[in-house]
Image (spheres, rainbow, N blue to C red):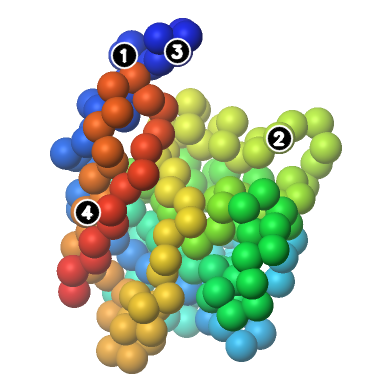
Amino acid sequence: MVTSLGDGVTGIETVANGIVGRGVLLDVGRCCGDDGELPDGFAITTEHLNATIATQGPTSEVRRGDIVLVRTGQLARTRRDGWGDYAGGAAPGLSFTTADWLHDSEIAAIATDTWGFEVRPNEFDVAFQPLHQVAIPNIGLFLGEMWDLDALAEDCATDGVYEFFLTAAPIPVTGAVGAPVNPIAVK
């Protein structure tokens, strides 16, 4: 499908007006971290996701077709302490072991406040970003990275409501396999 001319079948332009639905914030940083932040290299497991859902309550229950946002707190730390190697360095993120949870939950998309969605460094050396290699082509997930989730997380923690209407339309670059989005959560 992807050649030097781009993705001729499933380019990002095919979903430019279709990434919209129920969003759910899972503030794993607040639930499992120190002072609302996970350390770099922290691998978020299914147990962490389920513990966050249980802690946050019924509005954070993940349903089929949801767009799940996972806050680690790394972006907040980066803003406070400096950018350093945020874009490309070590980061908290989803463990490869969450692949079954991602598949079984039947979510439509997932986004994080980190540069790479999954834990860095990767959990094994034989593949770069191995969860990407499973989640995109085999589960069909849209992945979002570097989302600013701090204001949303504060609002959700204040009112105890972790679900919202979410739209995240990508720029319709013909043939691109990804593009920047302008996510908007409406509560």
Q: Residue at x 59, y 80 (%)?
A: 80
User: How far across and how far down the image is residue 92, in percent?
Assistant: 65, 62
Question: Is residue 153 visible to us here?
Answer: yes
What is the distance, in whole Å, between disc 2 and disc 1 at their CAs?
A: 25 Å
> How dense is the environment of label 2, judged by Cα within 10 Å: few (below 14), some, or many (20 and up)?
few
The circle drawn on residue 18 is none
Compared with 16, 119 (above or below) is below
Cα distance in 3D space between marks 4 and 3: 26 Å
Can you tell which mark lies on residue 9?
1
Quarter of the image where the N terminus is located: top left
1 or 4: tag closer to the N-terminus: 1
Q: Amino acid at mark 1?
A: Val
Of the image marks 4 and 3, the number of the one nearer the N terminus: 3
Q: Is residue 42 above or below residue 122?
A: below
Q: Position of residue 171 (x, y in %)?
A: 27, 38
- Give whichever of discs 4 and 2 has the lower sequence position: 2
Residue labelled with disc 2 = 128
Residue beneath the point at 28% across and 89% down = 159
Circles 1 and 4: CB distance less than 8 Å? no
Q: CA distance from mark 3 to mark 1?
A: 8 Å
